Amino acid sequence: MSTAPLRSDPAFAREADATDPLRGFRDEFLIPAQAGGNPVHYFCGNSLGLQPRGVGEILERELAVWREQAVLGHHRGDTPWYRYHELLRAPLGRLVGALEHEVVCMNSLTVNLHLLMVSFYRPQGRRTRVLVEDQVFPSDMYAVKSQIRWHGLDPERDLVQLAPRPGERHLRTEDVEAFLEREGETVALVLTGGVNFLTGQRYDLKRITRAAHAAGARVGFDLAHAAGNVPLRLHDWKVDFAVWCSYKYLNAGPGAVAGAYVHESHARDRSLPRLSGWWGNDPETRFRMQLEPEFVPVPSADGWQLSNPSILGMAPLRASLDLFDRAGLDALRTKSIRLTGYLEYLLDELAVARVEILTPRDPEARGCQLSVRLREGARQAVETLAARGFVCDFREPDVLRIAPTPLYNTFGDVRALAGVLAGEASPR
Ligand SMILES: Cc1ncc(COP(=O)(O)O)c(C=O)c1O
């Protein structure tokens, strides 16, 4: 990846794309077309990733097994369904920095959050509180409040939201640490995002985990906006649990099967309460339920499974994770920092009067997404972008979330977007 000084002329984008070592990966995706036939400029990988070309084929393979083998497909062929989720362990483990037996592909994100809170939110005595970030994704908030009430407690008292300091926009890690030092003995669980969905702030998960453990609390993360976006080392950081979805940066399609991580130190702990179902049971004895009715959890993240998972929901994820493996996580992150840095540079150079960047300026404190406030005429700007073939995510009243993803976005996409926000009359 070139490190030449950034420039705002359109030729720079062409040069950067021509020398991008990952440029071939864009062709691995199906990009929707604009009315004239040109591909859209897609900046919504933070919401729904594009479809990898390999998805059709991998799905058709399983449809053929279903068609031709029906129930025998559970145990026949190259990818028997009985152990299909195991095929995802190695690539998912690499993606989130976990051991293979610490990750499992199952359910959807909020369901996994509930299942893992059952095990890791265990209020006792004075230690009853859940500590979350200020701008929590609403589904997480509903989940946390309902768990607190489930234990007969009161969210008014037992939910703590840590906000940035007055006049600041981002939560400081030292403030999380200071809170936990001061009041940690009342905290049962710390739960934050990996990258905040609204501001794009990336949290220092290593330090938060250390501070939570020093205070005697458990720690879990919602990695919806972090998985496939920023480097993660969940095992080394000793994170207790994490959950993520697969339809954003992981490009596995709408409602695709989600992921969960549980540190191996918990997997063998039979004293941890959990909600159980047959797919969490030892696969060797799973069908001997009449003879061996007692639940024997798999001593790994698999032990938190409930039901047999959707093969058609998991197959696209295999196609997508293959691309991550081929591109390499380090190379993707290098391009991501450059691409988002280019977007930031262009907005500062060309469109500073019209947009205010809300995401941290430090590349280490963010992923690929920049959230920007449109200073005036937000609605009009969003309509102009849509009319010119840009797909971005708008949050009322005036925040645009722009996520240039290194697998399929180009420097040309970014230059074109900045041009529109700068009020340039036509694409240059
Ligand atoms: C940060 C975050 N958490 C949770 C969710 C909810 O995910 P699901 O509907 O898969 O449970 C989303 C969905 O976009 C999200 O962005």
Image (spheres, rainbow, N blue to C red):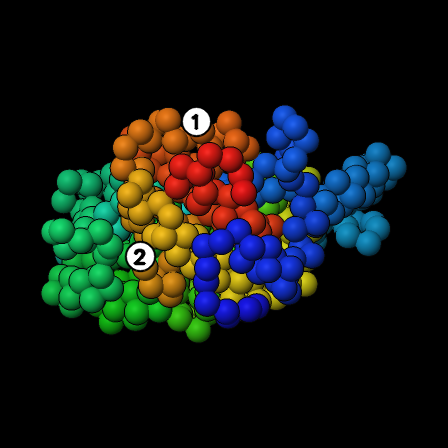
Point out the image quarter for the N terminus.
bottom right
Residue located beneath label 1 in the image? 383
**Amino acid tagged 2:** Pro
Give the number of the mark in front: 1 or 2: 1
- Within 10 Å of disc 1 (Cα), the crowding (few <14, some 14-19, many 20+) is few
Name the residue that disc number 2 marks: 360
Q: Is mark 1 within 8 Å of ligand 1?
A: no
Q: Residue at x 64, y 59 (%)?
A: 18
Which of the 4 image quadrants contains residue 20? bottom right
Give left or right: position of 191 versus 186.
Answer: right
* 169 lies left or right of 27: left
Q: How many marks?
A: 2
Q: Position of residue 129 (x, y in %)?
A: 20, 52
Would you place residue 160 above or below residue 21 in this image? above
Q: Are marks 1 and 2 in contact (CB under 8 Å)?
A: no
Amino acid beneath label 1: Glu
The quarter in which the C terminus is drawn is: top right
Q: Please tell me which residue is depicted at 37% across the width and 65% down the height of the picture.
A: 364
Instruction: Using the image, tell me which numbered label, if any, was put on residue 31.
Output: none
Where residue 349 appears, as percent x and y from the top left, is 36, 53
**Is tag 1's residue or tag 2's residue first in the polypeptide sequence?**
2
Instruction: Give the CA distance from mark 1 to mark 2.
Output: 26 Å
Give the residue at x 65% y 28%: 36
Q: Identify the element where label 1 is drawn.
A: helix
**Observer-nearest residue: 210 or 51?**
51
Q: Is residue 265 above or below residue 356?
A: below
